Amino acid sequence: QVQLVESGGGLVQAGGSLRLSCTASELTFNDYTMGWFRQAPGKEREFVGSINENAESTNYAESVKGRFTISRDNAKNTLYLQMNSLKPEDTAIYYCGAKRSDISTYDYWGQGTQVTVSS
């Protein structure tokens, strides 16, 4: 059974940094594009960024460009999200997801980790 487990969330002041991790099990990790999404209270889940299978290509939402960096370590089956210059509007539950590169929808999701940015 495929599992994605996020960690690293927490409470941070505006301007601070956090690094989220997402570790996959029972998944051929390097066959999948990995993505980060977030959902704030009362809002739809939104795309944060993604990274392809061999880490050669990344995409980011405009709202996080220049502040967030996605990376992966295929040897460790782990995805990362380095978040710098955090803003209160970054407060959300952050989810990682996995999808085949030739398919538009994400097949697998983690349970989420809470990020709270205080002003």
Image (cartoon, rainbow, N blue to C red):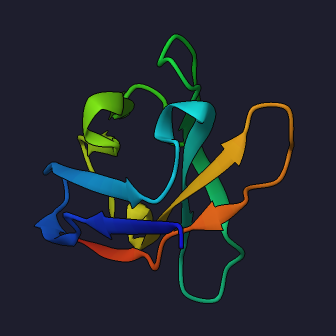
Between 87 and 37, the one nearer to me in the picture: 37
Pick the quarter of the image with the C terminus: bottom left
Residue 44 locus on image (x, y percent): 72, 75
Which residue is farthest top? 56
Residue 65 locus on image (x, y percent): 48, 30
Residue 90 locus on image (x, y percent): 41, 61
Res 86 seen here: yes
Between 103 and 81, the one nearer to me in the picture: 103
Q: Residue at x 19, y 63 (%)?
A: 8
Disc tally is 0
Q: Residue at x 51, y 52 (%)?
A: 27
Q: Is residue 69 above or below residue 114?
A: above
Query: In the rendered view, does 64 fall on the left or right side of 46?
Result: left
Q: Is residue 10 above or below residue 18?
A: below
Residue 111 locus on image (x, y percent): 46, 79
Q: Residue at x 86, y 41 (%)?
A: 103
Asked where in the image residue 61 lies, by quadrant, the reply is top right
Query: In the rendered view, does 66 fall on the left or right side of 31?
Result: left
Which residue is farthest bottom? 42
Asked where in the image residue 91 lies, by quadrant, the reply is bottom left
Res 119 seen here: no
